[in-house]
Amino acid sequence: MMRRILIPVAALALTLLSACGSDDGEGASPTITVLAAASLQGTFTQLGEEFEADNPDVQVTFSFGASSALAQQIVQGAPADVFAAASESTMQQVVDAGEAPDSTPFAANSLAIAVPPGNPGKVRGIGDLTSPKVKVALCQPQVPCGAAAKEALDSAGLVVRPATEEADVSATLTKAKLGEVDAAVVYVTDVQAAGDAVQAVEIPKELNVTTTYPVAPLRAAGNPEAAARFVDFVLSERGQAVLAAAGFARP
């Protein structure tokens, strides 16, 4: 059965070391550890379940978090088999460090503004985020969703002073879900996955930013054959259908 891990990045290396040793027992299924951007949690959880059904010899363990933090862990030697990032620049850090031979784009995403039900801050567009009366949550600037938000705001000539900057897109969205902020700049797919927990305010196409998601097997993979199979599954038509249903575009 697939295991989904949601852990602080500081504890990631220790957890992954434990996961890599979890298949020492006789008859245990080989395990691959997949590090993936927080915005991929829903889709990759489903992909993992389908992959395991087709590959009963493999167990998939996930850790979801900010791509930048996961990339740093990989560069620092945390063992893993596959990395799926929310930006090509983040993946390039891993490739440049020699931890991945190359990567393949598999999805694209764009930004949206999530507001609590009823839109108490009366946010009608991206320009309203500059109002001092509107509490805004952004991702931290080093995180792909934060970098994308900054690019969109800069291109619109807008200066936003966020009430909070969160470690990843899931935490940013949660601020809007809980009504702790009036607006959160997240991905379109996150707003779709949240259902009635938030409302969406669109960002015009000419101001929006699209980010490309790459995936790669890692050089230090303990199970390189199974890692390659998982990457191929993500890139397959079945994998692409799961991503499309969640609102991701093709790269």
Image (spheres, rainbow, N blue to C red):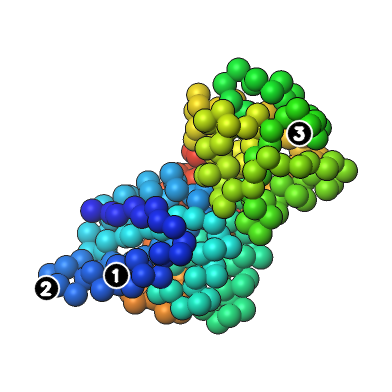
The alpha-carbon separation of the residues under discs 1 and 2 comes to 17 Å
Q: Is residue 206 left or right of residue 69?
A: right
Q: Amino acid at mark 2?
A: Glu
Answer with mark 1 or mark 3, whichever residue precedes in sequence: 1
Q: Residue furthest left?
A: 26
Q: Is residue 48 left or right of residue 114?
A: left
Circle 3: is it few (<14), some (14-19), or many (20+) Cα within 10 Å?
A: many
Mark 3, secondary structure of its residue: helix
Horizontal side of residue 160 vs 63, given as left or right? right
Q: Position of residue 168 (x, y in %)?
A: 56, 50
Residue at the far right in the pictured view: 157
Q: Which residue is mark 3?
A: 129
Instruction: Of the two numbered discs 2 and 3 on the same chain, state the one appearing first in sequence.
Output: 2
Query: Extreme bottom residue here?
Result: 98
| First reached walking from the N terminus: tag 1 or tag 2 | 1
> Mark 1, residues whose alpha carbon is within 10 Å: few (<14), some, or many (≥20)?
few
Q: Secondary structure at mark 1?
A: helix
Answer left or right for 230 relative to 170.
left
Where residue 112 appears, as percent x and y from the top left, is 66, 37
Q: Which amino acid type is marked by label 1?
A: Ser
Which label was assigned to residue 26? 2
Residue 215, numbered circle: none
The residue at which mark 1 appears reads as: 18
Q: What residue lies at 26% left-to-right and 73% top-to-bottom?
A: 21
Name the image quarter holding residue 28: bottom left
Residue closer to the observer: 52 or 185: 185
Q: Residue at x 64, y 21 (%)?
A: 119
- Between tags 2 and 3, which lies in front? 3
Question: Could one spot residue 232 in this view of the protein?
Answer: no
Is 143 in front, or is 180? 180
Marks 2/3: CA–CA distance: 57 Å
